[in-house]
Amino acid sequence: MKKLNILPQFSILERYIIKELIPPSILGLAASTVVVELIGISFEQAKFVANRGLPFSTSLYIHLLKFPAFIAVSLPITMLLASIFVYGKLSIKSEILAFQSHGISLYRLIFPALITSLIVAFIMLFVNEIIVPPANYQAAITLEESMDVHRDNLVNKNIVYRDFYHNNHQLKILFYAESFTAQKMQDVTLLIYNQYGDLKEIIKSYSAEWNNYLNKWIFDRGEKNLINRDGSYGELIKFERLSVNLDRKPLDLANHNFDNREMGIFAAYKRLSILQTTGDEQSIRKLRVNIQERYAVPFSCFVFTLFGSALGINPQPKARSNALGITIMIIFGYYMIRVISTGLGTAGVISIFWGVWLPNILGIGIGSFLLIKKSC
């Protein structure tokens, strides 16, 4: 009986090139991770150890927690270096010319590297979304606790939450709290509207707290003002304690103590759904940019591999040193464009899609142009 094999069948050529990619990838990953780690945290941690008395053991623990993030950041650079090295070596040994003389195109030659880059991109996506966020959170909490800082005790100010009717998108409620600390809202104002957009009630209270058992908000020491149909103030009711049927989203909004780097993709989407009720367009755009980057950054593995392959393929041995020099320019150029374009996307000058994906689109265009030019 014939075996059913759902795994891709690689040719001898493809297996050969993938095998050639492995050693420089391992070496490049180690080298680039060390460089990224030194730039990203080592100098900062050294200041904490020297100036703030951070224990060395704590600093080492934070380094270990940050290590997955540094590896993930290093993967695109690793693919760039490995592809330049491998295809440069094949060019120097005239293997590229030999393959071409047997009718094998350059596109066929770089295909294994591109497939490998997509696999690495999926690995990077997995690491960034499953491993890195909890590790980053634990690292931040460890550092904050060593500095005697506790997130739950920090005061969050000016909490604004809006909810709308689904049928006509009219404003349903407007919830405002001057501050939030110790799981309690302070100086709360709640405006309740009908489905025609008319104000029905105004509730003001000294504080408000979410009750998990009742699934309601409990407002303490305040007043409830009913609004007449003509817009004039109606009955005024003072209260010591009032339960209000309102979902817990204002609490989720105020109780968010996570940096974007400490959230996985699903938590980021959940956060976005809450932020969209606030009308804070700047924060919404920042989070949307962050969500798009979670897809675009892993895909840069493919872009860097295409670039590296196009640069490495050259029958002239002297081109190798030029390609290695251009490598640094590619890295800085890519990240410079990324900083500028994402900044424009966040500011609303260009769309978020173009702001995040422009470096990859330019990279694919330039890399393809170089490859086509060398194929002619």
Image (spheres, rainbow, N blue to C red):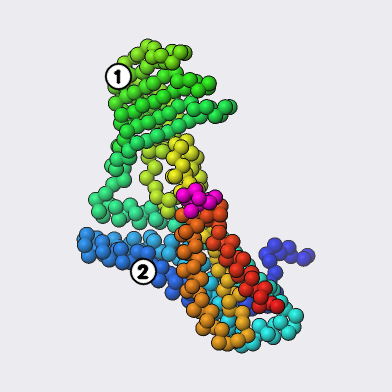
Q: Which residue is mark 2?
A: 38
Residue, far top: 235
In the image, is residue 212 part of the stretch drawn in magenta? no
User: Which image quadrant is residue 210 in?
Assistant: top left
The residue stretch that appears in magenta: 344-352
> Which one is in front, 248 or 173?
173
Residue, far front: 349
Neighbours of disc 2 within 10 Å: few (<14), some (14-19), many (20+):
some
Q: Name which residue type carries label 2.
A: Leu
Height in image: 133 above or below 194? below
Task: Say if residue 10 shows up in the picture.
Answer: yes
Residue 344 image position (x, y, % from top left): 48, 53
Q: Which residue is mark 1?
A: 240
Name the residue at 68% across, 85% down. 97
Height in image: 337 above or below 227? below
Judge left or right: residue 329 versus residue 14.
Answer: left
Judge left or right: residue 134 versus residue 18.
Answer: left
User: Alpha-carbon distance for marks 1 and 2?
Assistant: 57 Å
Height in image: 318 above or below 37? below
